[in-house]
C-alpha cells in the first residue's frame, strides 16, 4: 500500500485524541479531542467518551489508552489521526521557549502539525533509549517476558512476515514509546487492523485475571513495542517518511525513583509494581 499524499495540507483535517481518565488542562486548538478513556459506566467528566459508537471501552483497565485509539480508528474520519496523553504531549518548542510560554502555547499547534506533515508521513516521539537494556530484556526485567513470548507466537501464526521485524525490534536498545503518534488515517487503519487481532488473542491466551491492577494493564504495554514492530515492517515494504519530534511531560517526573527502579529491575530482578 502506497501512502497517499494529501493534496492541500491547509485544508486537511487532523484529529489528535488526548487520552485521559480525569479532568485536566486541555488545549483550545480544535485539532485536539479530549477523550475520556474507560468511560463505560463512569460519570461524565465533560469530555467525549470512548463508550459510544464502535468501541472497546470495557477493556480500558487492561488496554489503557488503546481503547481511545480503537475509538478514534472506528469513529473518526479525519485525514490524520494522532494519539497523545493528558500528561505527555508533542511540542517542537525548545526548553528555553517552554519556560516562557503558557501550557496552551507549548502544545504542538495545528499550523506546526500541518507544516510537519507536508514533509513527513508519520510523527513519533523522540526515541527512548535504555542503553544497558534491549527492549526485550527491559520488559522481561520490569514486567513478565511471557507476554512478549506469547505475542511473538501469535504474530508467527497470524502474520509470519512480521516475525523478523519483531525479533529485530526486541534486540534494539530504544524505541518509540508511550503509544504516541500522528499519521494518515489509512496508516492508522493498517496498523489497527494488524494490532488489535493480536492483542485480543493475547488476552484470550493470557487473561488479566490473577494479575494486580498494575500488571493487568500489560496489553497496553506490549502494544508500545508492537507499534515499533509494525512501523519497522511497514517501512521495509513501503516508502515512508518518519519524523521524531520532542514530547513534554505535563507532570513532574521523579527521575531518581524512576532510575532506581530501572536498576533494581535490571540487577536485582525486582519487578515494577507501579508507574513512575
Image: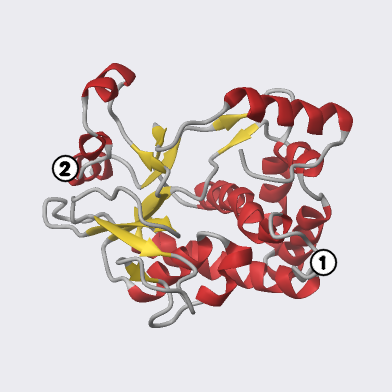
Q: Which mark is residue 111?
A: 2
Give above or below for 258 relative to 43: above
Q: Position of residue 248 (x, y in %)?
A: 40, 34
* Residue shown at the point (42%, 58%) measured from the top left: 22
Q: Is residue 23 above or below residue 87?
A: below
Viewer-closest of 256 and 124: 256
Which of the two labelled residues, at mark 2 and mark 1, occupies the earlier sequence position? 2
**What residue is pinned by disc 1?**
210
Residue nearest the observer in this picture, 168 or 210: 210
Q: How is the image coloured?
A: secondary structure
Residue at 59 percent of width and 50 percent of height: 224
SS for dot 2: helix
Please, what secondary structure does the residue beneath circle 1 have?
loop
> In the shown orientation, is residue 63 left or right of residue 105?
right
Q: Residue furthest front?
A: 43
Residue found 66% across the figure and 68% down from its top: 198
Viewer-side label of 2, 1: 1
Task: Report crowding for label 1: few under 14, some 14 to 19, many 20 or more residues within 10 A (C-alpha).
Answer: few
Quadrant of image for the C terminus: top right
Residue 134 appears left or right of 86: right
The image quadrant of residue 131 is top right
Residue 174, horizontal then vertical, whole percent: 62, 33
Instruction: Report, in whole angstroms, how far the alpha carbon at label 2 lies from the one at label 1.
Output: 47 Å
Q: Quadrant of residue 173?
A: top right
In the rendered picture of this protein, how many numbered marks are placed on residues?
2
Image quarter (top left, top right, bottom left or bottom right) of the N terminus = bottom left
- The answer to whether residue 206 of the structure is visible from this angle is yes
Q: Is residue 201 left or right of residue 267?
A: left
Q: Which x, y percent locates residue 178?
A: 53, 46
Q: Seen from this angle, which residue lies furthest right?
A: 268
Compared to residue 173, the image places residue 140 above or below, namely: below
Amino acid at each position: 500500500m502506497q501512502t497517499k499524499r494529501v493534496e492541500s495540507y491547509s485544508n486537511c483535517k487532523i484529529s489528535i485524541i488526548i487520552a485521559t481518565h480525569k479532568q485536566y488542562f486541555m488545549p483550545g486548538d480544535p485539532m485536539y479531542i479530549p477523550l475520556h478513556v474507560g468511560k463505560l459506566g463512569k460519570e461524565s467528566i465533560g469530555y467525549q467518551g470512548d463508550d459510544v459508537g464502535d468501541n472497546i471501552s470495557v477493556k480500558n483497565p487492561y488496554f489503557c489508552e488503546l481503547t481511545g485509539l480503537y475509538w478514534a480508528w472506528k469513529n473518526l474520519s479525519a485525514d490524520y489521526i494522532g494519539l497523545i496523553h493528558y500528561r505527555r504531549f508533542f511540542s517542537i518548542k525548545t526548553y528555553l521557549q517552554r519556560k516562557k510560554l503558557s501550557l496552551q502555547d507549548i502544545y504542538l499547534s495545528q499550523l506546526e502539525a500541518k507544516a510537519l506533515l507536508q514533509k513527513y508521513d508519520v510523527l513519533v516521539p523522540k526515541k527512548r533509549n535504555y542503553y544497558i537494556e534491549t527492549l526485550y530484556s527491559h520488559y522481561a526485567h520490569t514486567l513478565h517476558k511471557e507476554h512478549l513470548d506469547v505475542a511473538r507466537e501469535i504474530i508467527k501464526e497470524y502474520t509470519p512476515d512480521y516475525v523478523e521485524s519483531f525479533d529485530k525490534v526486541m534486540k534494539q536498545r530504544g524505541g518509540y514509546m508511550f503509544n504516541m503518534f500522528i499519521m494518515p488515517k489509512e496508516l492508522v487503519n493498517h496498523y489497527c487492523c494488524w494490532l488489535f487481532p493480536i492483542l485480543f488473542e493475547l488476552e484470550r491466551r493470557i487473561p488479566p485475571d490473577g494479575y494486580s491492577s498494575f500488571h493487568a494493564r500489560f496489553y497496553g504495554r506490549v502494544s508500545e513495542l508492537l507499534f515499533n514492530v509494525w512501523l519497522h515492517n511497514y517501512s521495509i515494504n513501503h516508502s515512508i517518511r518518519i519524523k521524531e519530534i520532542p514530547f513534554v511531560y505535563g507532570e513532574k517526573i521523579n527521575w531518581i525513583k524512576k532510575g532506581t527502579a530501572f536498576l533494581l529491575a535490571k540487577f536485582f530482578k525486582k519487578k515494577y509494581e507501579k508507574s513512575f
